[in-house]
Image (cartoon, helix red, strand yellow):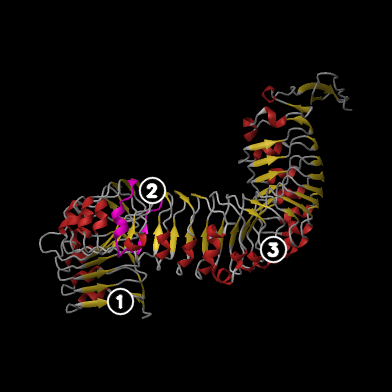
Amino acid sequence: MGLEGTIAQEIGNLSFLTYLDIGNNSFTGSIPDEIGNLNRLRVLVMSNNQLGGHIPTSLGLLTNLEMLDLSDNRLTGSVPLSSLLKISSLRVIAVTRNQQLTGSLPVDMCGPGTRLEKLRLSINQFVGSIPETISRCGQLKIISFSYNNFTGSIPVNIGNLPQLQILALGRNQLSGSIPPSIGNLSNLNTLDFSSNRLQGMVPSEMGQLPNLTFLSLGLNRLHGDFPQSIFNLTTLQTLAFTLNNLSGNLPPSIDQGLPNLQFLYLADNQFSGKIPVSISNLSRLTTLDVNGNSFSGNIPITLGNLQQLQVLRLGFNQFTNNLSIPQQDFLTSLTYCKNLAFIEISTNPITGVLPKSLGSTNMSASLEDFKAFSCRISGAIPDEIGNLNNLVWLTLEDNELTGEIPTTLGRLKKLQRLSIRVNKLHGSIPPSFCNLENLYHLRLTRNRLSGELPNCLGNLISLRRMYLGNNTFSSSIPSSLWSICRIQVLSLFDNSFNGSLPPEISSLSSVIELDLHGNQLSGEIPSTIGQLQNLATLSLSDNELNGHIPESFSSLRNLQYLDISHNNLSGSIPKSLESLLYLSYFNVSFNELTGEIPEGGHFANFTPDLFADNIGLCGSSRFNVEACEMVNTTKSSGNNILIRYIVPPIASMIVERLL
């Protein structure tokens, strides 16, 4: 209605008021205590406002109240459940989505004559256990306690609530086993015990719930064989048991037992056996998620019959399809699924080549995410994959792909993540990549790519992470890369990049990780690198850098990892580096450094190998270097000056008198 302001205390003077509904407005302030004076009030609805403060205990005086709805506000403090539950006429208590309400259920719930039908406490901070006496609330149809901090076990006599339709206890800290009496709740349509600490086996009695449409027990500690009786709940639409330790097989006639199934979540369990061909007859199925199990055999090519399918996750199993054999090429059959947005087949021993049909018209209209990493897929990436106009995520890493990167990938204007690392791809990065204006993550590591990097890569303003390491790229690093001010990770290690690091490196103001080790970079390390205030990891090892370690390194306040070993650096290690509070790794071995090794700060924890093969370093014996000796010299004025020097094992150094 758009009303706002506060609720006046004078509302308590409306003694004949029986119905008060001010829900879906913008009222602020607190609920007046005076509302407790409205002893004829039957309905009190204040949901969907911005009310704060405590719930008045005076509400327990409303002896004729039938409905109390204070949901979706900003109320705090303890809910006076003990007094509210003594109102025998009360049918509905709803305080959901206040987030900060607290309290616990009274031990003695629901006395004689109680009419309570709906108890909604979800998305708050309730604590304590669910008392056994809740079974005395014989008229209850809805128990909604999700997203709280309830502990203890589920009451063993919870099955004594014959009218119960919704039992939602998800996202709490409940433990113990699931009571078999659950099977007595013949009117139950929604059962959610997900995200708790429940243990033991799933009771077979759950298969006796003839009206159940939603069953979710994911993210618990359940184990043992999955009851086959659950696969015969013909009304079931959602079946979710993700992240448990359940085992068993899918029944051969799953389509007959679950004809109305829309969502099947069995990921991260120990299910095994084959995916039955009959699963393709579940005409209403929109999500099939069996990731992270031990399923084997071939993925049925009849999955293309699932016209409503939107999400298909089959990764981390033991499927053995050969995509080069038409009778096993399930990807081509999926082109008939016009709504399919997500495909995950990663970490299966799937062989053969990616079919050109992957870029079909149906796929191009719907597919957003395709993950097929750590398989055994070979051959070239088909050009037709560039037709997938809506693709956001493409992951083909850790396969046996060969050939060049298709230039058609540059058409994927919506692409945000592209990972094809650990393959055998050769050639160069296509200039068409510069059209990927939404690309956030690019990972091409460990291929056989070569040539120069396209200078226009610096125009990818959305790019945050770029991994091009372990290839054979050559020439200098394009100057445009130093201008990607929002990039967080730039990894170009183990290539053949040459040239020097420019002062403009300071433009990488958001960079957290900069890995350029294993190249042919030369020249001095620019002092402007000290302006990279977010830098945590810097690796410049195994190059041909010379000059001194910049004093400005001490300005890298978030630096944790610094490796500049195997270069030609000279001079001393700046003592100011002792001030770097988070520095846990520091390697300057195999250079030409001289002077004393600092001992303060985290240097006290560094080992000798991190300073090895610098013949001019001296310091504490624990670094396996010569001591820095003190020498007295005298000026003409008679003042003594102490000079530290090293006596090398073969020839001593001459210390000149300072005049």
Q: Quadrant of residue 410?
A: bottom right
Q: Is residue 248 inside the magenta stretch?
A: no
How packed mark 2 is, by other alpha carbons closer than 10 Å (few <14, some 14-19, many 20 or more), is many
472 to 24, vertically: above or below: above
379 to 611, vertically: above or below: below
The nearer-to-camera label among 2 and 3 is 2
Q: Nearer the viewer, residue 445 or 338?
A: 338
For marks 2 and 1, the one nearer the N-term is 1
Magenta-drawn segment: 224-243
Tell me if 192 is positioned left or right of 465 in this view: left
Q: Which residue is mark 1?
A: 22
How packed mark 3 is, by other alpha carbons closer than 10 Å (few <14, some 14-19, many 20 or more), is many
Q: Which residue is mark 3?
A: 460
The nearer-to-camera label among 1 and 3 is 3
| Residue 465: x %, y % from top left | 64, 55
Instruction: Look at the numbered disc 2 and give the secondary structure of its residue.
Output: loop
